Image (cartoon, grey):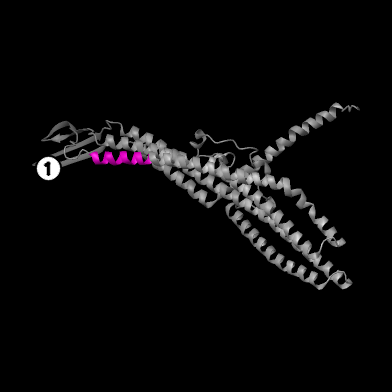
Amino acid sequence: MRRLNWPSSALALFATCLLVVPLFGHAESSNWNAWLATQIEQHPDIVAAREQWLGANANADAAEQPIYNPELSTELERDGDENNFLVGVQQTIDWWDKRGAKRQQAKFLRSAAEAQYRKQVLNKTADALDALVEWHFANRAAMIAQTQQQQFNTLLELVEKRKQAGDLGSIDAELTFLSLSQQLLQVAEVEVALQRAQTQVRELLPEWSPERGGIPNEFWPPQLDSVTDKELLKHPTVVSAYDRWQSFKEEAKVIKRATKAEPTVGVNAGRDDGENVVGLTFSIPLTVRNNFNAEIRAAESKTLEAEARFQALLRKQRFDWQAAHSTWQRYAQQYRRWQTVAQDRVENSAQLLERQWRSGDLSTSNYLLALNQRAESLLAGIQLEKQTQRALTEVLQQSGRLNTGTIPAISPTN
């Protein structure tokens, strides 16, 4: 057995290539993810969602402000030759810390608004990926249909020549012409589908062009692990529902504390009958006619409703992911089966069929039938691969893993 002695420089170059190629693929995927995130961020729907986020943050800022402002009061009267006046300042004290509960509520309102924004970005990203997948495979289907049409054009010319030479009859030419007529309709349909898919991508991604192509292979995860409840709790849809529940809990606390009486103290100074006077005031409301129990019950009911909706949404998210994952597994299994059974045979069958037809081993009708079946098999493979990628996009969306690398890591500024 002969042993190969590699120079050390060659070994070093080979090792470097092994390291650089995966890194290059990762860098290319990261750049594409960043480009996709930028495109999604520019979409008008996402711009509107961002402004909604900013508005929610402003409302949260307002909720954190002090509840009571000081009040200034004045009193002026004329008593004979004397001008009597009084100036006072009074302040209601937040004795039960309603502001503290409002601060907690504002925290959850901010988190819910951010989760809602990320949910819309997540859905828009999934729509863009779905549109790119649709365009990519529509483009491939159009290429197959156009190739099939060219084959029929060439076949029709050959049939006419062989007909004139006496090798084939008129029925072969008619069958070829009919097949070509059907293929013209199929080409028109796939080209229209391609144009629609291309328009959809351009609507979602402003700077996209066909030259940029579809989704790089490095974007798709090499494997999918089962999603845990902990991961589902981080899904933007679930986070938004959870934070809404918590905000209602804090609002119930605010309402409960608002039913409790809080004192108002004040100080005033002025002149009365030519003498300087200073006074203190103190007041407190008496909740004897209305104890606000109805408002408390309503707030508690809202809290329980929000909790039930959160639990229902978390449950739905879990089952939605399971359904998406099962769908993806089914499509992936059938696509792998197609690759094993049909892909190599279909791709290498065109020349074999043509040789058999030219040699007379295959009739024209059977040749046309075989060409149509070959095209249908190729389109079936395209459809299986397309549905596999669309199902994979759905799995990533339902698990929330589509967020990674595709959602801008930014926060709104006030």
Observer able to see residue 207:
no
Q: Closest to the observer: 280 or 371?
A: 371
Q: Residue furthest right?
A: 2
Observer able to see residue 356:
yes
- Residue neighbourhood size for the residue with mark 1, other residues' Cα within 10 Å, grouped as few (<14), some (14–19), many (≥20): few
The quarter in which the N terminus is drawn is top right
Question: Residue 332 is drawn in which quadrant?
Answer: top right
**Residue ID for mark 1:** 78
Q: Closest to the observer: 312 or 193?
A: 312
At a point 62% along the width and 56% down the height, the residue shown is 197
Q: Number of callouts in the render?
A: 1
The local secondary structure at tag 1 comes to: strand
Q: Is residue 347 above or below residue 410?
A: below
Q: Position of residue 230 (x, y in %)?
A: 50, 33
Stretch in magenta: 292-306
Q: Is residue 392 above or below residue 365?
A: above
Q: Is residue 340 magenta?
A: no
Q: Is residue 390 left or right of residue 169?
A: left
Q: Closest to the observer: 159 or 261?
A: 159
Q: Position of residue 412 (x, y in %)?
A: 49, 41
Indicate the amino acid at tag 1.
Arg
Q: Position of residue 394 (x, y in %)?
A: 56, 45
Q: Position of residue 309 (x, y in %)?
A: 40, 42
At a point 63% along the width and 37% down the height, the residue shown is 223
The kind of secondary structure the magenta stretch mainly shows is helix
Q: Is residue 11 above or below residue 408?
A: above
Q: Residue furthest left?
A: 80
Q: Is residue 302 magenta?
A: yes
Q: Is residue 374 left or right of residue 247?
A: right
Q: Closest to the observer: 100 or 392?
A: 392
